[in-house]
Image: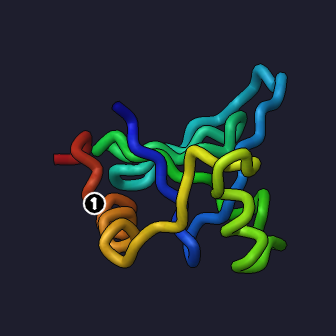
């Protein structure tokens, strides 16, 4: 089962589907960003929503968007531990350079 998280300070609520066939995948440490979907996937199986799509949402709007029937109901605001884990994935050394 895949776990979904949203990082409140690092990543905001956004899930964008496009028909762009020239999608880019960007990898930083243990995180991979797919610019076609706006989803960041960790090597630990977690998924995060991209920051740039919903940066305009305030805290109350974010809570509403992540509740049942909300636009991003499969996600939630990350706990401190989840945010810490995401940060550690981002700064993890690239295993291909070892």
User: Where's residue 76, x and y in %?
Assistant: 54, 59
Q: Give the residue at the far left of this rendering.
A: 98
Q: 44 above or below 92?
A: above
How does the figure colour the protein chain or chains?
A: rainbow
Judge by depth and name the residue closer to the eye, 16 or 59. 59
Q: Give the residue at the far front of this rendering.
A: 68
Judge by depth and name the residue closer to the eye, 64 or 40. 64
Q: Quadrant of residue 34?
A: top right
On screen, residue 62 versus residue 40, left or right, reads: right
Dot 1 crowding, Cα within 10 Å, few <14, some 14–19, many 20+:
few
Q: The N terminus appears in which quarter of the rendering?
A: top left
Judge by depth and name the residue closer to the eye, 69 or 20. 69
Q: Quadrant of residue 93?
A: bottom left
On screen, residue 84 versus residue 13, left or right, reads: left
Q: How many marks?
A: 1
Q: Residue at x 68, y 49 (%)?
A: 72
On screen, residue 5 versus residue 9, left or right, reads: left
Q: Residue at x 34, y 40 (%)?
A: 45
On screen, residue 27 versus residue 26, left or right, reads: left
User: Where's residue 44, x and y in %?
Assistant: 28, 44
User: Where's residue 52, x and y in %?
Assistant: 74, 62
Q: Which residue is mark 1?
A: 92
Q: Residue at x 83, y 23 (%)?
A: 19
| Secondary element at tag 1 | loop
Q: 34 above or below 86?
A: above
User: Where's residue 64, x and y in %?
Assistant: 73, 64
């Amino acid at each position: 089962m895949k776990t979904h998280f949203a990082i409140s300070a690092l990543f905001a609520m956004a899930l964008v589907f496009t028909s762009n066939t020239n999608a880019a995948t960007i990898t930083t440490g243990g995180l991979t960003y797919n610019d076609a979907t706006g989803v960041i996937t960790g090597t630990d199986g977690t998924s995060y929503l991209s920051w740039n799509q919903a940066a305009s949402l305030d805290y109350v709007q974010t809570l509403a968007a992540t509740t049942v029937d909300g636009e991003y109901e499969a996600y939630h605001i990350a706990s401190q531990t989840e945010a810490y884990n995401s940060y550690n994935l981002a700064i993890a050394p690239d295993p291909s350079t070892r």
